[in-house]
């Protein structure tokens, strides 16, 4: 009895079927993770609403709950479940609470982005990770200004009307690196394009990009340069 070797087309169909199955399995796993996160979030919110006083009075409980909140993709700060709405009046306590969240984001949640983050990037991250907060347009800026006034961040600097940078680490940007960031904002960036826009030598641009990369503020992929913490 002889067996026919499968054709190239049959082998391809089999590989495609396996690939589709693997992709589908990965999707199920990811969906399951998200489902678990939602269950954790619901449980955390229920606990904090029903017994917030007991939880906050115990360091052991708040420490454990803080870890679970992070596992659920929530802020590490216990007691910030439920709707938090920006008030029109008596804002001091709210701004202090908001500033604490912003410091957590910049120092911990986005620490791999180099320590300097644009206010636009910070605002986007806050909206994505803290859906229970209802903010007014200038709340984030007010919270950052509070951090600056209390010397909890080294610097908050406006480079242009479109680009404001929050320094969560004491990193100094040279004049050249600031100019690079200003002209690079909102465009697809390459070294050649920077040379053309700035009117600098290639060597001067290379030095500036190297400084930004060494501080973790720029990433180069093939001929393109990205600034993940800024936009």
Image (spheres, rainbow, N blue to C red):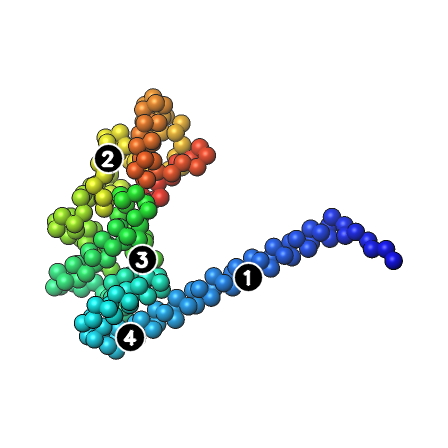
Label 4 environment density (alpha carbons within 10 Å; few <14, some 14–19, many ≥20): some
* Residue count near mark 2 (Cα–Cα under 10 Å), binned few <14, some 14–19, many ≥20: some
Q: Earlier in the sequence, mark 1 or mark 2?
A: 1
Q: CA distance from mark 1 to mark 2?
A: 46 Å
Disc number lying in front (2 or 4): 4
**CB atoms of marks 1 and 2 within 8 Å:** no
Sequence-wise, the earlier of marks 1 and 3 is 1
Give the labeled residue for mark 4.
Answer: 47
What residue is disc 2 on? 173
Spatial separation of the CA atoms under disc 4 and disc 1 = 33 Å
Residue lying farthest to the front in this orientation: 60
Q: Residue at x 21, y 41 (%)?
A: 170
Q: Residue at x 25, y 55 (%)?
A: 104
Which residue is depicted at the point 71% across and 51% down?
11
Residue beneath the point at 23% across and 57% down: 101
Camera-near label (1 vs 2) is: 1
Left or right: where does residue 1 sit relative to residue 160?
Answer: right
What residue would you read off at disc 3? 127
Asked if the residues shown at circle 4 and circle 1 are in contact, with their CB atoms under 8 angstroms apart, the answer is no
On screen, residue 73 versus residue 152, left or right, reads right
């Amino acid at each position: 009895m002889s067996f026919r070797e499968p054709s190239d087309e049959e082998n391809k169909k089999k590989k495609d079927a396996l690939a589709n199955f693997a992709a589908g399995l990965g999707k199920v796993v990811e969906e399951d993770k998200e489902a678990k996160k939602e269950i954790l979030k619901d449980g955390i919110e229920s606990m904090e609403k029903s017994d917030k006083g007991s939880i906050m009075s115990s360091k052991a409980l708040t420490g454990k709950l803080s870890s679970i909140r992070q596992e659920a993709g929530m802020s590490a700060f216990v007691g910030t479940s439920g709707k938090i709405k920006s008030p029109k009046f008596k804002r001091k306590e709210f701004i202090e609470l908001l500033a604490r969240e912003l410091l957590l984001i910049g120092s911990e949640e986005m620490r791999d982005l180099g320590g300097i983050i644009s206010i636009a990037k910070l605002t986007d991250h806050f909206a994505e990770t803290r859906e229970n907060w209802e903010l007014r347009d200038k709340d984030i800026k007010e919270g950052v200004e509070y951090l600056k006034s209390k010397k909890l961040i080294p610097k908050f600097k406006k480079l242009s009307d479109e680009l404001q940078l929050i320094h969560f680490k004491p990193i100094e940007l040279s004049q050249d690196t600031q100019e690079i960031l200003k002209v690079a904002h909102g465009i697809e960036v390459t070294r050649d394009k920077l040379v053309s826009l700035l009117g600098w030598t290639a060597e001067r641009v290379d030095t500036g990009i190297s400084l930004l990369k060494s501080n973790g503020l720029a990433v180069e992929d093939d001929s393109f340069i990205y600034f993940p913490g800024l936009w």
